[in-house]
Amino acid sequence: MGKKCFVPRCTTDYKSCQEKYSLFSAPKDDERLKLWRHAILRKDRPLQPTDSACERHFEFHLVTKTWTAHYNGNVLMSVPRRASLACDAVPTVFPHCPPYLSKRSTTRKRPTERQLLAPAKRKGTPSSVSNNDDDPPNCHMSCDEMPAVQAGIDIESPKAQSGPEEAHCSPFESLCGKIPHHFCLLIHGVAINVSLTV
């Protein structure tokens, strides 16, 4: 009888599994064997040095299937060979077990390798607020366009100005020239009287 993968629910030994995977013996060193035992949890018995685990349970970069020699920056030889495992490898990938048992290491990419991400949106900003500076600010709101007066809020009608036919609310005229456009959009949703009290 040949060796089988010790990991519970592993299907590499099944006849239905078409791919062939390499088996790696458990480490003989007591410290590394403890790490493997902690990673591979089985209820029936603990992992022994005579047991083995297949390559499916190790991260890709920990399993080497080729041998290469480098001399002056050139590859001298690359010969297919039997798979070998990194000396500090611990099984962390368990595809047929619950996801909390698999602990894949996350390596952060170098800044040159990372793609530039879109600028993060701030919380609390309304989706209707435009960050385009191309749009001219439309901050002059006539008093007829102001929202309906809620209970307890009085809006005094402004005095008619000479010249333009449409009377503009002076608080909006004076405010909108001094504050950014997206704040003006927020102000338009609130009823404000001439003395700037809400």
Image (cartoon, rainbow, N blue to C red):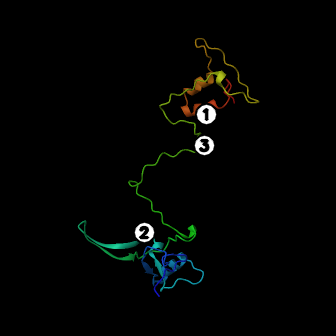
Q: What percent of the width, then of the height, locates residue 195?
A: 68, 24
Tell me the residue at 60%/43% (across/down): 124
Q: Which residue is mark 2?
A: 60
Is label 1 in contact with label 3 (beta carbons under 8 Å)? no
Q: Where in the figure is residue 69, as x and y percent of width and height?
A: 27, 72
In the picture, measured across the screen, residue 69 lies left or right of residue 8, that is: left
Residue 47 appearing in the image: yes
Name the element at disc 1.
helix
Residue drawn at the location 62% of the way across and 14% of the way down: 161
Q: Measure the alpha-carbon separation of dots 3 and 2.
A: 42 Å
Dot label at residue 124:
3
Q: Residue at x 47, y 46 (%)?
A: 118
Compare marks 3 and 2 and give the one earlier in the sequence. 2
Amino acid tagged 2: Phe
- Tell me, for residue 186, which label it has, or none: 1
Q: Amino acid at mark 1?
A: Leu
Name above or below for residue 168 compared with residue 130: above
